[in-house]
């Protein structure tokens, strides 16, 4: 299991917007220069974040902006906007355990509830951290490291 880089890139997008929005037009090219990925990747993520109501994107001279107060956007909101978690399940269970084997026949019963508990704990922790927390920490680190 590994959450893709889309999640951290999306959080990076929010930190960039909050940090630079007063001084720069926040375009996919601008964001890609900070994140160091292709602008096409950024545009796709911006579309997903926009569809989730987290980012506004204005064509032409507008650029990207955060659509609602950062205190109201959790990491879980970002995660659900950009990650493709099939059927809402974080863990992909191997497809065909051998039902002729006593372990293979019972492994789903053994693991399903445990994996759901792990996923629920992770999601609850993500719900407790906001984009405002990330922005605040980003600005603090910038301030501390530019002295």
Image (spheres, rainbow, N blue to C red):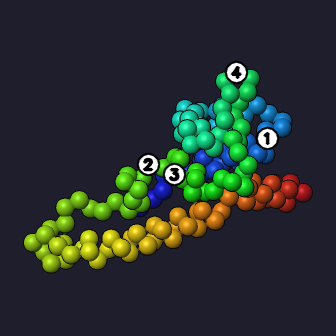
Closer to us: 44 or 39: 44
Q: Distance between the residues labelled 1 and 4?
A: 18 Å
Between label 3 and label 4, give the one nearer the viewer. 3
Image point (41%, 56%), residue name? 88
Q: Is residue 123 left or right of residue 147?
A: left
Q: Distance between the residues labelled 2 and 1?
A: 29 Å
The residue pinned by badge 3 equals: 80
Q: Quadrant of the N terminus?
A: bottom left
Indicate the quadrant where residue 105 lies. bottom left
Question: For numbered disc 1, what is the local secondary structure?
Answer: helix
- Where is mark 2, residue-wise? 84
Q: Position of residue 7 (x, y in %)?
A: 55, 51
Task: Please tell me which of labels 4 and 2 falls first in the chain.
Answer: 4
**Which of 24 and 132 lies nearest the eye of the viewer?**
132
Q: Where is residue 133 in the image (x, y as percent from the top left)?
A: 73, 60
Q: Mark 4 points at which residue?
A: 60
Whole-angstrom CA distance, mark 3 to mark 2, is: 8 Å
In the image, taking residue 126 as reference, residue 108 lies left or right, namely left
């Amino acid at each position: 299991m590994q959450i893709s880089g889309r999640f951290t890139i999306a959080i990076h997008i929010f930190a960039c917007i909050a940090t630079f929005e007063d001084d720069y037009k926040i375009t996919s090219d601008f964001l890609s220069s900070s994140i160091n990925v292709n602008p096409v990747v950024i545009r796709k993520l911006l579309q997903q974040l926009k569809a989730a109501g987290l980012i506004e994107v204005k064509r032409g001279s507008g650029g990207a902006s955060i659509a609602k107060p950062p205190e109201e956007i959790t990491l879980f909101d970002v995660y659900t906007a950009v990650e493709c978690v099939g059927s809402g399940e974080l863990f992909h269970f191997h497809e065909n355990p051998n039902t002729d084997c006593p372990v293979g026949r019972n492994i789903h019963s053994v693991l399903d509830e445990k994996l759901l508990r792990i996923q629920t704990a992770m999601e609850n922790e993500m719900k407790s951290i906001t984009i405002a927390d990330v922005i605040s920490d980003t600005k603090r680190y910038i301030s501390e490291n530019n002295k």
